[in-house]
Amino acid sequence: MSKSVKTGIILAILAAGLYAVNSPLSKLLLGYMTPTLMAGFLYIGAGLGMALIAFVRRVKKTEKTEARLTKAELPYTVAMVLLDIAAPICLLFGLKATTAANASLLNNFEIVATAVIALLVFKEKIGLRLWCGILFVTVSCLLLSFEDIGSLQFSFGSLFVLLACICWGFENNCTRKISSKDPLQIVLLKGVFSGMGSVVIGFCIGERITVFWSVFAVLGVGFVAYGLSIFFYVYAQRLLGAARTSAYYAVAPFIGTFLSLLIFRTLPQYMYFIALALMVVGAILCANDEPIFKKKRVKGQAYRENTAEKAEDARANTR
């Protein structure tokens, strides 16, 4: 396993851990702020946090030279922003109608959505082991979801969470297309345009801020769960690709569920630990994923794998 792949795995898991605080804390804050406005302020918090990091870098003169977005990436950038308006709104409406633990578990569907979209729409090559890893993750999700039959009713809440996962599946692949560009710039765009878009929609449909301190709390959650998480996720995508990054990101629902159990004072059943074991197997398979297609050895040269993902790794190592 190359150094860049190991770094990508660490960044993907770190991004997952930071995002995991979103469901339980957002569930608590929904008692003080409406869903659409909260979705907007979460992304605005991400943008403000990244702006602060950019300022500190500039003052300390530790800025790295990163490629800037161009007109060529405009379609993916616009799609990313629009999907980042729709996804968190769907998630928060789902959270309002279901439990935080249930929403965290259903978030695993994002892995499947991202991988299928990467394969069918964006033609990203996916190795056999990765598919097996995704299968283990999916089975793990199903076991957890049916731990208590009554907890996984396909209510509007659950459907909204699944719809959010589909939106993020498309968004992950759009972000993958621009992941070679400056991650700070990407997160700032997400924060400013997706955040303001959601806030405008919220005010237009009649939502209002009634508890002033909740704005600052939501901004803080947004900086951690969206800003820092997206920042590390973009770097991970640069090294791993959309499908593999999403597979490692699968630990987020487990962390989110664990936090939900602590916050809302409920204990996991034995099925949780069986599902956790399956998730570990899935993560190991993803970590040792190898592309299926290889070129033959030519005049003593090493095997060179003919996949877009490996080509991206090679470009990342030259930066």
Image (cartoon, helix red, strand yellow):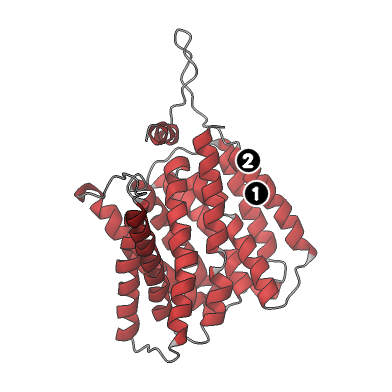
Q: Quadrant of residue 86?
A: bottom left
- The nearer-to-camera label among 1 and 2 is 2
Q: Is residue 112 above or below residue 190?
A: above
Badge number at residue 269: none
Q: Residue at x 65, y 42 (%)?
A: 284
Residue 110 picture location, percent across and down: 51, 58
Q: Quadrant of the C terminus?
A: top left
Q: Could you tell me which residue is drawn at 51 percent across and 69 percent down?
A: 161
In this view, the residue farthest toward the right is 270
Whether tag 1 and tag 2 are in contact, CB under 8 A, the answer is: yes
Image quadrant of residue 257?
A: bottom right
Residue under circle 1? 136
Q: Residues within 10 Å of mark 2 (few under 14, many from 20)?
A: many
Q: In this picture, is 43 found above or below 276?
A: below
Q: Is residue 188 left or right of residue 299?
A: left
> Amino acid type of disc 2?
Leu
* Inter-mark Cα distance, 1 to 2: 9 Å
Left or right: 155 in relation to 147: left
Q: Name the secondary structure under disc 2.
A: helix
- Amino acid under label 1? Phe
Residue linked to disc 2: 285
From the viewer's perspective, is residue 218 above or below residue 187?
Answer: below
Task: Assign a secondary structure to mark 1.
Answer: helix
Q: Foreground residue, 312 or 11?
A: 11
Asked if residue 296 can be seen in this view, the reply is: yes
